[in-house]
Amino acid sequence: MSQFDLKIAIGGAAGQGIASVGNILAWIFARRGLHVLAYNAYQSIIRGGHTYLTIRTSDDPVTTHGDTVDILICLNQDTIDRHLVNLRAGSFVIFDEDKIKPGDVPDGVQVCGLPVKDLAKNPTNKRLSNTIATGAALYLAGFDIDPLVDSLEKQFSRKGPEVVAENLGSAQAGFDFAREHFSPLAGEIPDKRPGLPVISGNDALAMGGAAAGVKFYCAYPMSPATGVLHWMARNGPDLGIVVRQVEDEIGVITMAIGAAHAGVRAMCATSGGGFALMTEGIGFAAMTETPIVVINVQRAGPSTGVPTKTEQGDLWQMLGASQGDFPRIIVAPTDIADCFTTIPEIFNVADKLQCPAMVLTDLLISEGTGTVDPGVFKWDQKIDRGELITTSNGSNGDGPYLRYKITDNGISPRAIPGLDGYIHVAASDEQDENSILISDEFTNPLKRQAMVEKRGRKMASAKAMIPAPQLEGSPDAGLTLLGWGSTKGVLREARALLEADGVAANHLQIKWMVPLHDEEIMAILSKSKKVFIIENNYSGQFARYLRSETSFMADGHIRKYDGEPLQPHHVVDGVKELLKGESTLYVPTHEIMV
Amino acid sequence: MSQFDLKIAIGGAAGQGIASVGNILAWIFARRGLHVLAYNAYQSIIRGGHTYLTIRTSDDPVTTHGDTVDILICLNQDTIDRHLVNLRAGSFVIFDEDKIKPGDVPDGVQVCGLPVKDLAKNPTNKRLSNTIATGAALYLAGFDIDPLVDSLEKQFSRKGPEVVAENLGSAQAGFDFAREHFSPLAGEIPDKRPGLPVISGNDALAMGGAAAGVKFYCAYPMSPATGVLHWMARNGPDLGIVVRQVEDEIGVITMAIGAAHAGVRAMCATSGGGFALMTEGIGFAAMTETPIVVINVQRAGPSTGVPTKTEQGDLWQMLGASQGDFPRIIVAPTDIADCFTTIPEIFNVADKLQCPAMVLTDLLISEGTGTVDPGVFKWDQKIDRGELITTSNGSNGDGPYLRYKITDNGISPRAIPGLDGYIHVAASDEQDENSILISDEFTNPLKRQAMVEKRGRKMASAKAMIPAPQLEGSPDAGLTLLGWGSTKGVLREARALLEADGVAANHLQIKWMVPLHDEEIMAILSKSKKVFIIENNYSGQFARYLRSETSFMADGHIRKYDGEPLQPHHVVDGVKELLKGESTLYVPTHEIMV
Amino acid sequence: MAAVTTAERPTITAKDFQGPVDPDWCPGCGDFGVLNSLKKTLAELGKAPHEVITVSGIGCSSNLPGFIHTYGMHTLHGRSIPVATGLQLANHDLTVVVTGGDGDGYGIGVGHLIHAMRRNVNLLYIVMNNEIYGLTTGQTSPTSLIGMQTKSNPEGNLDMPLNPLAMAISGGATWVGRGFSGEPKQLGQLMKAGMEHNGFSLLDVFSPCVTYNKDQTYPFFKERVKKLEDNGHDPSDWRQALEKAFTWSDEEIPIGLFFENRDRPALHETEPVLRKGGPLALRPLGISPKQGQALVDKLM
Amino acid sequence: MAAVTTAERPTITAKDFQGPVDPDWCPGCGDFGVLNSLKKTLAELGKAPHEVITVSGIGCSSNLPGFIHTYGMHTLHGRSIPVATGLQLANHDLTVVVTGGDGDGYGIGVGHLIHAMRRNVNLLYIVMNNEIYGLTTGQTSPTSLIGMQTKSNPEGNLDMPLNPLAMAISGGATWVGRGFSGEPKQLGQLMKAGMEHNGFSLLDVFSPCVTYNKDQTYPFFKERVKKLEDNGHDPSDWRQALEKAFTWSDEEIPIGLFFENRDRPALHETEPVLRKGGPLALRPLGISPKQGQALVDKLM
Ligand SMILES: Cc1ncc(C[n+]2csc(CCOP(=O)(O)OP(=O)(O)O)c2C)c(N)n1
Ligand SMILES: Cc1ncc(C[n+]2csc(CCOP(=O)(O)OP(=O)(O)O)c2C)c(N)n1
Ligand code: SF4
Ligand code: SF4
Ligand SMILES: [Mg+2]
Ligand SMILES: [Mg+2]
């Protein structure tokens, strides 16, 4: 693990400017070429309540927001009341001592009360207390003031020189106050310039869409997926992407299917409740064999649930979406960068197989923000549209065009409407090869059977289109941590922590859920004496799904379903507990009161 | 198996009066106390096309429409062209020889062309040809004419004496013509008077609702579930059941939930596509802990699919309906009588567990019609509404009322709105015991965890509320036929046929899908050398589900997904084929062109 | 349910409807005014808290049931109306008040609204219309004006706004009004009239979102609203009502009671099972063996 | 797509639109008239079959795309409008004709309709309004009259029927007409005008269900319909249009063009990406590395 690993937390009420402090810090770190990851534990409330942003930076890639806090910035009394108890010796707590009383301070925690009234360069500007705190935090973290100056100048320049001056002065005052009273955290701060891009998972999904050639994006706002819509709305017009807000999620998916049928790559995103409304449309896309990509950014359910909290609770909803049997693709990106990468990948699969494809991500990585390797952003993606006919041959040479032609691999050449020679009807009813319905007058059990099998055969070639999961760590470790989707980072870090504690483990993270590389997975798991499945839900949705495909039963389970993400120590504690063999389920308790 | 076992098929175009011939025959058989089962293979078309009704009668209970046909009545040329080839020696084909040409007749089939023009008592009444054919069929079946006379009098009396007379005369002419030219099928026809009631599965579901105390039924028409709405609309006003047709299925389920929340037992029915629209509501019922019963009458999917054909393709849709983890009940009635019995049973479970409960049936038994033992219709059902508070104590004695009180079994007393002393809000958001939201300002991971676990604990007591499945046949047979829901009859008959062929088998039929009696099932299956799972879908939805719960892998699978139901010989052939051990999947070919 | 006559009752005040928690709306949000008027109106009508149920969808405005002391059901986004219909038909003794936002009621939920108006279900539907999606942090709503810039339409909204009053009046609603949370007195009167009306009452309320809607603000409405009752509007005149529903200018945006039809019975008064007898929820369950036998006899 | 000018084209006749199978509607069903008029109109407008796409929901009427030789999409019940919107925006060179029933469009699908009218998507929506659910064998539809007895309402319908024309005119549709399948000439003219109109055109058509609706039959309409054009109706007069939309009596049920607004641009003409350039479906995929780099630069 890296030498330099700094964790800062900022807490306060919604509307107090927490995100802006976080953005400044992230920008400063990322500009230095450090890796950053930020996670905001917030509430479904516009003003007030409690928001708690964790930002972690390191010279190694940061994959989780970690277990501990080095510097806690409290913007209100509530924050210090909730979080001070969790600080360990050597860490700092920063707050406005005119307004906030620290109460009982854990041993060794350094209390950095700032006399904000005295330090603020303009008493009427309430936000200066945030700037002062940022200055102090930066000193304590071992940085110098220059990058903060740059950042504030950039941020406030359009508000005029006075505002810039009062912010710079206040930042300096906070920085100086800290310097006069404390010594900063030990350790050299690496300099890895040039800087790194900072992005949220939602923005990465949207940008991945742009890279994949999405030309039609439509959505209905729903947390935590709304960010994709906002990015698309901001950038679509310049990029030639039509972006439409629709009246509901049923309209969203059916509109996207209409656009996809016309020949564009169409995408939409929602969360679990919106996805529920889309399920009928998923079956429609399957029956008409229209490729379409639907993103479900999971939040804590059931029902409206906890809209601003994370969970991996929708896997079975995706597996079972819509009536009947049909091919579907489900992929769960494993981190922010993967959100970008996955979209062009899945569009190619969807286009080749002509079926609905679903991206299953969650609030943790979609609303999480972090640095990514700029090499991730590839703009010359291979776009493979499969057997798509987009130009007219005047009239189709070899006999009549059969939209649903029965082929060995189940894939039938797909012509877009408007071409001479390829007239056909795409119907939600069962149809014959020539797209004539066999649901009415022409029902025919043999044809029906053949069409079901034709569609089903498409899945046979699906596995070859996607990579099998790869084990991290030694195959002989004896213990495998098995996760899926967004938990990759936390499991990777937990494994490192376990190894540091003398517990050998390897780690397998599943990204492609359907099709599942069952044989490859079993080949890996069969080498382990113990397998623990870790997931962010109550019922073990992945464990149950894996079992349905492979009969595999894990030796232990770590499950968390309180709305907050798993932290590395939850996994470490869980693994140690499970290794005792007294129980097969470990449910961590979330210590941080957010 | 029974001595007397008669199978009649009637084919023609929609609008030709096939159902009415079928109804007359069923009434005649049932009135004699014989058991009857009828299945109509029809199309989504109001006039024209091809409809093929099979009616089977026996002195033993009839559980499938069987494999063969003794008397085929053809109302048009198309029918004879399609079905004559499937007749075996000794059977009869009846048709209007003025209009229909039989073509190649299989050896031994007796051709009974009726000179309709001569026999009809009124040349302008086209429907008389049906009456003539019915008369002939009845003679060939070995009946006398009296019951037909009764039936025609009953049916036509309100159309006046002339119509009655021409029908009676024509029936007699058909009967006499057959007597003059053919000898009837051998064998005594048992007389088991008094008669038996004849009912469809849909009507049985609706009547089960009435028996269960349903007071609010709402629906949106959708084949093959519409029959429930029609029964309710016809009978609701007399029975004190409010029946509402709603604008869509989203409105249906949410309206039913509103009514259920107010304290009535509320029910609704739909098919797969409508159920897809209801899934968000299922999660809403779960979160507010509102008991509600939703019926899904499956038809062949995906999407609009084949609306008039049967399938067991929605199990995973029900398992995965709505986002997040929550308790749900799923039951699959096993025959028409069970449709009645299941509804009061599941309402008691739903009320006790305060959760959504789903009935998963299919076109086969819902639109199938048959006799049932009149003892099935119990009107003094035990109605257990669980912990429901319906009277006010002025004010709630022991402190404030906690709608979502955390209890050992997860069940919290539920007060209906309108009572003094029990004010609360039922929300789709996560809430505290006192029904204050913990999704906004008061988010709290510990409370959230506790509420998820509280709801989850309800399932612990669920299994005890429902009976475990029972094996039919010898536990030591070595081979188990394993099915679920509507296939009970066909598997039972297949087992008998297999035993007659010297293949010993027993039979396990699963009705309660969630919760699943996994241990009891495994105890039974572990005694079998081979287990074959038989289901009416492509992907083996039950096999996959069972595996997800038990890791169990069957030795063979028989799957049919052409829209038509399994017939006993499909299972027999499949079992024999699978026993050869050359493959693990057998897909029968449907021989009857409907 | 104990039958308490109004005479025996202790006097009820707005305080009796004080909710268990303070609203978490942004300071200055128009929804505060709606909540206050609602509490006052219920008290004025002498309703006891347990006789009332507030039903909502999802949105800032839809959080209202959590902030008032009545029974409540906080349903799904866009689904308050069918849930409330089920509730009202199952217990027509309850006073059913539905509260929600423009996105909830006129966007995703508009289909249910159209059909509920046709059915004349007896309830008051209060739509806190802020011409924006508040809870999801500021996207275009169906009532956003053309050109309005939001997070989902940074280049400006292209879609013609929906006119809820015109839709209701031409769609058969029997009571249609519009209030403004900056005019609490009239708002209270409208709520009262809407609750007293026997049938479906739609009360659209300008309830500014101070955080995300910088166009339709308090001052915007203050300058423009004109009370219908001050201008001799006759709510029984259907044509005039429609005319007024289409009036929207810098000089006049009418508020008040647009339209009322007292002649149509409410659904529970015509429904065959409900038109006689008390609330369905309090009737005995099941059917008699005699009724059951008659059903079986029909099958023979 | 080869650009063929009208001049070079072979003459197109209704026969060119002959579908692959004969309609399986009941003999006498009103939908035959609609199909015939549609084929004739398309030929008259000189459209080649591959330039047209017919989009439908689910219902007897929605089976139409299977009976005509054009591209087609037979979608889900109630969802033809959003599917057609996606199609039209993705390829605005296509002539998009949406066909469906009253249950499909005014019942389950009415929410989409309301919003599509606000958006002025360029398509013609033909609703075969038979005041009944045909395909599901005869239940009440949203346009069924009060008192009508159906399988779902044996005691008679209680709900006020929806008035599609009034809803459209007051809801902002830019072209609103009504035809009758027993008046094929006028029906053809209306279809032509609707297709030529640039924006959303709603054409409601009385298309009797001879099997399940014994109330609104051919004779019922024959006796009552009066053509608007015979009575000097001015379709640009919005108030008069609304007045006519509410006219329904034994003496007069108006048919013809009720309302037309030629001033509002269609959605694809205002949408920032579409207002310049050809159909989206024919544009090159992806974005340039330069554009991509600019997006990444913004993140630094
Ligand atoms: C099915 C579904 N889709 C989307 C959402 C997300 N969502 C919550 S509130 C809301 C809109 C709120 O707008 P409005 O109804 O106008 O209420 P306001 O917040 O403005 O009062 C949306 C889109 C949801 N909860 N459910
Ligand atoms: C989600 C869903 N619900 C219900 C149905 C069943 N259904 C098919 S057509 C139809 C109504 C048809 O009525 P209408 O649109 O008026 O068409 P018509 O048959 O009268 O031409 C219904 C309810 C369906 N296909 N999908
Ligand atoms: S965001 Fe707008 S609508 Fe929501 S509480 Fe704040 S001011 Fe009110
Ligand atoms: S049922 Fe009615 S609408 Fe359907 S085809 Fe027959 S006549 Fe036409
Ligand atoms: Mg709003
Ligand atoms: Mg219709």
Image (cartoon, coloured by chain):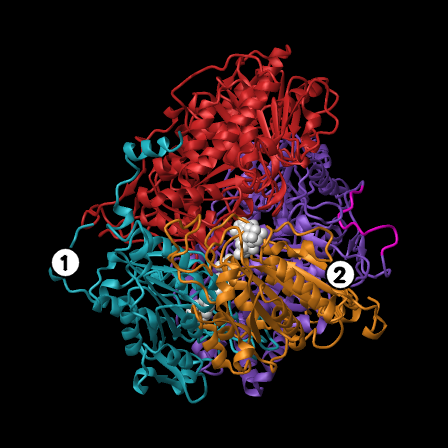
Chain colours: A purple, B red, C cyan, D orange
User: Label 2 vs label 1: CA separation?
Assistant: 75 Å
Local SS, label 2? helix
Q: Callout 1: residue from which chain?
A: C
Whether residue B514 is visible here, answered yes or no, is no
Residue A39 drawn at (x, y percent): 56, 59
Whether residue A425 is visible here, answered yes or no, is yes
Front tag of 2 and 1:
2
Residue B556 drawn at (x, y percent): 66, 24
Label 2: few (<14), some or many (≥20) within 10 Å?
A: few
Return the residue at label 1: C5
In the displayed structure, does residue D131 sit left or right of residue B391? right
Label 1: few (<14), some or many (≥20) within 10 Å?
A: few
In the displayed structure, does residue B278 sit left or right of residue D269? left
Q: Is residue A406 magenta?
A: yes
Q: Callout 2: residue from which chain?
A: D
Return the residue at label 2: D15
Q: Point out the stretch of residues depicted in magenta.
A: A396-407
Measured along the vertical axis of the image, is residue B252 above or below residue D276? above
Camera-nearest residue between D152 and A252: D152
Q: Is residue B394 magenta?
A: no
Q: Main structural element of the magenta stretch: helix, strand or loop?
A: loop
